[in-house]
Amino acid sequence: MKIMRILIIIILSTVLFVSCTKETVTDPVSDTKGVLEFKCINPMVSLLKNLNSNAKISANPPLVGDTTVTINTSLIMTIGDVWISQGEVRAGGTDNLEWIRLTDVTNTTLKLFEDYSFPAKELPAGTYKSIKITFRNIWYRQVKLVSDPTVVYELLETMGSSSDPCDPNDTTWIKPNYFAPGGNFSLGEDGKFHLASAGEKVDGFTIKEGKLAKVYWRLGAGATEPCINYLIDKNGNRQWDCGIDEVKIDCPPSVVYMWDFVVEYE
């Protein structure tokens, strides 16, 4: 009987020890955190020194002829939300990825591209491969007159065709853009990803415990030479009419893609 009691005590002690051990074990990976900063950069910002737009759209000055020659300095747009994922967007795949939202609230205000930056975000450590970004349908092309750089135009356009009708009060959103190592993708009506531009890609970035990662979204993919924008006044009224007038773009060889991503670590 005494031996039996001793055996029971030993068994209970073992069970208690194992239980306590399991309760105190933590997963070291899931508890690690790092910090991410996401910011938009316009390498053409030196061209903006004499501009005081602050994304306040007002009446444009008259066009100077049937063709008005300008240089593109920036975009004024509404970037709503930004998400990131450790999963990878691939052509033919579906959006079954787990997304982490970087924006606390959805932005609905027009801003210059280079004015966008988002608060630092603490994130689980790991390698992130995809970025999802939403845009409002309407935006403004900011250009300045080649013959007189003090003259600035902010030209209303839509994210679709230049011949699409434009409404400055349009509050609709286009489908999100998805960026991954394979390029820039859109989600089609078939529910699958379709490649839009192979060069507009993000190669991925790593969040490390206690470290800061900075992701810069660069307009013009880092090019510092501006594109020439020829504003074609198709109805001859010397005003920019979205959906009627046309922009013909001539870019230097250094301008290959609309944007890219650069990653730095501290």
Image (tube, rainbow, N blue to C red):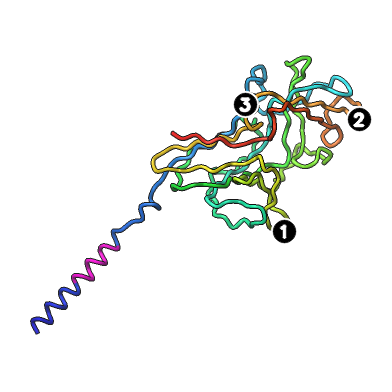
Q: Distance between the residues labelled 2 and 1?
A: 39 Å
The quadrant in which residue 233 appears is: top right
> Which residue matches tag 3?
43
- Residue stretch in magenta: 13-22
In the rendered structure, the answer to whether residue 35 lies left or right of residue 117 reads: left
> Which residue matches tag 2?
235
Question: Circle 2 sits in a helix, a strand or a loop, which is it?
Answer: loop
Q: Residues within 10 Å of mark 3 (few under 14, many from 20)?
A: some
Spot the residue most to the front: 253
Name the residue type under label 3: Pro
Q: Where is residue 154 in the image (x, y as percent from the top left)?
A: 74, 27
Q: Residue 58 carries which label?
A: none
Residue 255 visible, this angle:
yes
Mark 2 or 1, nearer chain start? 1
Q: Which mark is residue 190?
A: 1
Query: For the point 72% across and 58% down, which residue is it?
Result: 190
Question: Circle 3 sits in a helix, a strand or a loop, which is it?
Answer: helix
Mark 1 or 3, nearer chain start? 3
